[in-house]
Image (cartoon, helix red, strand yellow):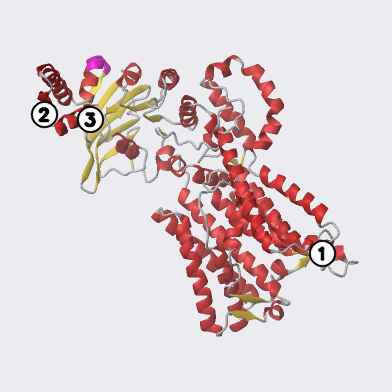
């Protein structure tokens, strides 16, 4: 457990978000200290994306409040969140493939000199910085003016994280950073997450892949259908328990028993399949998958 | 991938730098347009050498045609790079022309004030176009297509209502002695052609074209706003997520195209001394063609203002070249169509090349 002396980097206090009649989030609380990886787990539709968007200033919470370093904040735009050191690295990477590494690295926060209408980008400085920052994480972009589309998935993800760190992020929100990656590429990203943690950043790691999350996380918050199932310290919970809870323990048990039912019906002679409503079985399977 | 780059980092750098100039050139969006321009000039240099096309008068003629289209194309390219179209620019030309001519010729407003009035209207039209597009999320193609009809209809309707005709003339005398009319219709540096009775000077539109191309290129490549233009067209959501004010960027660029149309109108109206409600017909498509020939992707996120200027130069040169060579001008449209098709195919290939892993 990281030091809890100072105020938490980010303290979410029972926020709720509604879209019309849909309760997307209901009274979610979570906290993240410096040098801590807080893992947010949940299946599809659990409300992970809504929660991220609320934290990063895309949505405004309908109830509850968010404290940054002990101070209540009210984000109107993603820019406000960025200015407070909350950087979100989205699943779709927030990268423009046709633009160069440098232009992507500084997108929205170009290093400028001059004033007003004469303001211009310090292009040489930008190119060197982008190249150096990428080198720090072990990726050598030979030519920072090459299009981001030429980078691999893991490299792009690292570029997005490096960008956030460079711009003074205190809290990194990583949205499914490894889900689209192969094993080796995911390793690169996870190593970088550990590095960021060691540097004293707070990381909120959103994923549905427990195997990627478990080694780097300090704590887990489980989301299910817009509600929190609770927060658990790593020492109090095993990988299997996390997995079971995420899938929704009951659903998983039900699926197991239904699968046993199938097996019995199979051995009984094939006709037994109709004993079970096909729709219900499919639904259970989908929910648990 | 990371492994190989790490292992050979030092050595590879040297090796890559040697080929990088050619590669960088290939990666510039305007390459196709520059090559096309060279081809066009070589062709007409051979075919139309003795027709007077390359006399001072001839050069100024085709440059002026290119310049007027170029003014539109440069702004259209910025908007297209940001991922949007403006099909209403042609109608905006007619609208702005009448907005200058009616106050000046009918109501007795000084020309300079009438021009300012037209630009104010242009800002308004551009703002409304942009606002509807970004707020509704509808394709700008449809929204500005509506604008094309609305503006043209308003132009004809209002002009007939006020003057009873579809033409407003008599601006030539009114613009004499006007403090800013020379900015649009004058011939500059006349002393350079003192011994050439056929040329009065270089038309102002050519300077506008060059200056605006330079300005747009600088904005695009060297300012934060330029980066935002690329980002807005490349991936709207990604741009918004990192704090780029995508909507404001797009609205500003819609205002830009409407103002370019108004500049075009001011140049034409003051040059001809009259406004016609049919001015600017089909100019929106000519501008888009010039932009596409210039290497800008129809889908946004990639392109160049210099390319658009070269696209306009090709357009104007061929249009006048065909006239000078005495070929039936009907063939011009065939040429333009084929040219555009080749440009689009080429751009598509370039886009794949750019995003391919090297």
* Res. A23 in view: yes
Q: In this rendered view, identify the residue nearer to me: B35 or B225.
A: B35
User: Quarter of the image containing the N terminus of chain A?
Assistant: top left
Give the Cα separation between the discs numbered 2 and 1. Answer: 90 Å
Relative height, residue A135 to residue B53 (above, below): above
Q: Is residue A238 magenta?
A: yes
Secondary-structure class at tag 3 = helix
Numbered range of the magenta stretch: A234-240
Residue A5 lies in quadrant: top left
Residue B283 locus on image (x, y percent): 60, 63
Q: Are marks 2 and 1 on the same chain?
A: no
Q: Are marks 3 and 1 on the same chain?
A: no
Secondary-structure class at tag 1 = helix
Residue with the mark numbered 3: A286
Secondary-structure class at tag 2 = helix
Residue with the mark numbered 2: A274
Residue B179 lies in quadrant: bottom right
Q: Is disc 2 surrounded by few (<14), some (14 to 19) or many (20+) residues within 10 Å?
A: few
For the point 64% across and 65% down, which residue is it? B264
Q: Is residue A14 left or right of residue A191?
A: left
Residue A135 locus on image (x, y percent): 55, 22
Q: Is disc 3 surrounded by few (<14), some (14 to 19) or many (20+) residues within 10 Å?
A: few
Q: Is residue A168 magenta?
A: no
For the point 28% across and 21% down, which residue is it? A219
Q: In this rendered view, identify the residue nearer to me: A272 or A69.
A: A272
For the point 66% across and 36% down, which residue is it? B26
């Amino acid at each position: 457990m990281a030091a809890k002396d100072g105020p938490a980097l980010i303290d979410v206090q029972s926020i709720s978000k509604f879209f019309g009649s849909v309760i997307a989030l209901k009274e979610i609380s979570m906290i993240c200290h410096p040098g801590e990886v807080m893992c947010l787990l949940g299946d599809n539709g659990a409300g992970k994306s809504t929660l991220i968007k609320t934290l990063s200033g895309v949505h405004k919470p309908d109830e509850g409040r968010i404290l940054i370093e002990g101070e209540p904040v009210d984000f109107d735009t993603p820019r406000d969140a960025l200015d407070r050191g909350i950087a979100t690295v989205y699943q779709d990477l927030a990268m423009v493939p046709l633009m160069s590494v440098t232009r992507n690295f500084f997108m929205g926060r170009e290093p400028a000199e001059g004033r007003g209408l004469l303001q211009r980008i310090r292009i040489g400085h930008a190119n060197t910085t982008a190249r150096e920052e990428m080198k720090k994480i072990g990726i050598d972009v030979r030519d920072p003016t090459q299009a981001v589309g030429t980078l691999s998935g893991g490299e792009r993800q690292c570029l997005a994280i490096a960008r956030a760190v460079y711009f003074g992020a205190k809290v990194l929100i990583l949205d499914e950073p490894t889900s689209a990656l192969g094993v080796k590429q995911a390793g690169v990203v996870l190593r970088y997450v550990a590095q960021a943690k060691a540097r004293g950043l707070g990381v909120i790691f959103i994923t549905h892949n427990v195997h990627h999350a478990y080694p780097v996380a300090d704590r887990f918050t489980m989301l299910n259908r817009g509600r929190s199932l609770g927060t658990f310290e790593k020492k109090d919970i095993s990988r299997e328990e996390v997995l079971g809870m995420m899938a929704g323990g009951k659903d998983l048990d039900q699926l197991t028993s239904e699968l046993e039912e199938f097996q019995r019906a199979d051995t009984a002679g094939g006709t037994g399949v109709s004993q079970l409503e096909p729709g219900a079985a499919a639904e259970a399977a989908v929910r648990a998958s | 991938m990371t492994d190989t780059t790490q292992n050979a980092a030092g050595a590879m750098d040297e090796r890559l730098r040697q080929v990088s100039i050619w590669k960088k050139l290939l990666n510039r969006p305007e390459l196709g347009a520059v090559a096309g321009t060279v081809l066009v000039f070589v062709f007409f240099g051979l075919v139309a050498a003795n027709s007077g096309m390359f006399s001072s008068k001839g050069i100024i003629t085709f440059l002026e045609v290119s310049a007027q289209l170029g003014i539109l194309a440069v702004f259209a390219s910025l908007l297209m790079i940001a991922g949007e179209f403006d099909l209403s620019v042609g109608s905006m030309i007619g609208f702005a022309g009448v907005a200058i001519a009616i106050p000046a010729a009918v109501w007795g407003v000084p020309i300079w004030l009438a021009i300012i009035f037209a630009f104010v209207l242009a800002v308004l039209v551009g703002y409304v176009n942009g606002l509807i597009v970004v707020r509704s999320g509808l394709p700008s193609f449809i929204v500005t297509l509506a604008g094309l009809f609305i503006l043209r209809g308003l132009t004809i309707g209002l002009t007939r209502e006020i003057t009873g005709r579809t033409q407003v003339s008599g601006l030539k005398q009114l613009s004499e002695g006007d403090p800013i009319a020379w900015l649009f219709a004058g011939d500059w540096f006349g002393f350079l052609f003192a011994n050439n009775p056929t040329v009065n000077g270089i038309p102002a539109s050519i300077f506008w074209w060059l200056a605006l191309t330079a300005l747009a290129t600088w904005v695009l490549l060297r300012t934060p706003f330029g980066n935002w233009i690329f980002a807005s067209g490349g991936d709207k959501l990604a741009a918004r997520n990192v704090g780029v004010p995508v909507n404001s960027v797009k609205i500003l660029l819609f205002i830009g195209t409407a103002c370019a149309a108004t500049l075009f109108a001011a140049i034409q109206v003051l040059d001809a001394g009259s406004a016609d409600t049919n001015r600017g017909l089909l100019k929106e498509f000519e501008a888009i063609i010039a932009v596409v020939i210039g290497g800008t992707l129809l889908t946004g996120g990639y392109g160049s203002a210099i390319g658009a200027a070269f696209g306009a130069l090709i357009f104007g040169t061929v249009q006048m070249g065909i006239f000078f060579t005495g070929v039936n001008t009907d063939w011009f449209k065939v040429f333009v169509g084929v040219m555009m098709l080749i440009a689009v195919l080429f751009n598509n290939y370039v886009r794949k090349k750019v995003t391919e892993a090297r």
